[in-house]
Image: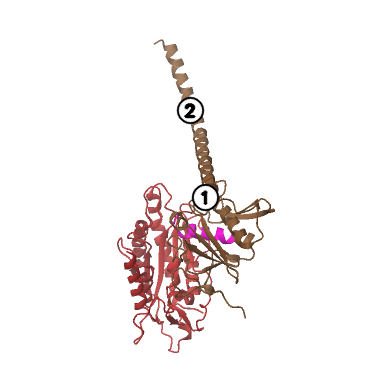
Amino acid sequence: MNPRWRNRLIAGLALAVLAGGIYFPALRRRIRRAAQLQAQSVEQARRELLNPAIGTPGEPREKTRLFWASADADGSLNPVTIELPLSNDPVLRSKQVLNTLLAGPVDAELRTLPPEASLLEFYLLPDGTGVADFSEALANSLPSGIQSEKLAVDSITKTLQANVPQVQRLKILIHGQETETLAGHLDLTGTFVVSGGAVADPAKLTPATSPGKLSPPEKKP
Amino acid sequence: MRTTSCVLILAATAALPFVSQTGQQPSGAPATPTPQAPAPLIPSPVQSTSPPQKAGLQLVVLDPAHGGTDPGARGTGGIRESDLVLNLAAQVRLALEKQGFSVLQTRQGNDNPSLDDRSAMINAQRGAIFLTLHVGSTGLPGTVRVYTLPDSSAAPGAPRAMLPWDRAQTFFLPMSRKLADLAQGELSLRFKGSPNTPLMAPVRQLRSIAAPAIAVELSSVSVDDHNALDRMVPGVADAIARAVAAYKPVYDSVPIGGALQ
């Protein structure tokens, strides 16, 4: 080959490698973002199919504060305000905000609860104790660890605190049963003070109760 | 497996119908409580009528969490919390023994004693503290957090001096906090990005420990290579050993087994 053409060929190849080097990371980022968006839309469609919206169109839209993980990954929560049609009934309202919390933020990395989990039922006892019954996926699919489990419970309690003032404490059940821990670490045998985050309220703990049974509501003097 | 777990829990309950301040089972205690019976009560150390006994800190009970069929947190690279904490416990043990402490482990191999069995191991000891070791799934890689139980009060319906044995940690919370302060202080010096002060979380394992007790959690199994976690182990072991050594005079200054009220 003519040395002149060979040099041109080498220069052309070098330019192509350089352009690829610059373009490749951007392409990777774009593909990852597209995959993320697709996963989210599939998940959203599944959720809408399985859990039709509880709110009726006539309900007024209210500013709702939802707590998801902070982007700093430091174990803290970040409040996000969105507008949602919310019921005045505290039970329906609790279901609405918890279902929205479960649906997750736009950035899936900031989730505090696994996408497979769902809220099966929510009850409110006369003493202000909310009972949230989640599917088994909450325990099985949540990343195990003290921080991750605390973050999950904190996001639930703080979201309820911000939006449903009638709920003063929270009992978490998994598929209708009381379980000892959430995913191996956090104690689920007691109730959580809704106003104080994932702090088990030992005054409300129920010693020696059978699994799945709750202590009777406190009698007011 | 479920039956075995139930038997183990019942066995632990039967072994600890009453936990005295010295951790010894008093004679004449009921042998086997029925599952429906209220949880046995333990006397408050500070309410005891017997003269306080001085038992300096001699023993550290290390609890490598999970094990057996429970791998704990799992990373995408096949990293298992149960394996990592066993290695960590071995290193912490060496560091503590160098400081002159005796060390007992709740498990030595790939078995999984129940949470109550692990509690029973320390509740039968005098002059001991409890450290449960974990590696989480989340958090900034290379950071370490120390946890104690949140503030608590006596269980409902129980006399002021008595508490169900599975809430035994209540008596020891102030001393657990002091230990946690020292441990987190040492760890935050070595691992940048770790919190400067300990955190509180209702960790189930801590609830039934009748001694100063903390949980230590490293971040995290999400790293690609377990060498990143292995490199943390000597620093964590050294920090914990130094914290326990600094804690000994605090523990020894409290008359009864580290319980403050």
Residue B66 vs residue A151: left or right?
left
- Mark 2 sits on what residue? A20
For this rendering, which residue is in front, A220 or B208? A220
Mark 2 residue element: helix
Which range is magenta? A143-158
Query: Percent from the top left, x then y, of residue B139?
Result: 49, 54
Instruction: Give chain A's shade.
Output: brown
Measured along the vertical axis of the image, is residue B119 above or below residue B111?
below
Q: Chain of mark 2?
A: A
Amino acid type indicated by mark 1: Leu
Query: Percent from the top left, x then y, of residue A34?
Result: 52, 37
Measured along the vertical axis of the image, is residue A27 above or below residue A197?
above
Query: Percent from the top left, x then y, of residue B213?
Result: 44, 70
Residue A125 appears anywhere in the view = yes
Q: Quadrant of residue A59?
A: bottom right
Amino acid type indicated by mark 2: Gly
Query: Percent from the top left, x then y, of residue A144?
Result: 44, 57
Q: Quadrant of residue B209?
A: bottom left
Instruction: Give chain B's shade.
Output: red
- Mark 1 sits on what residue? A50
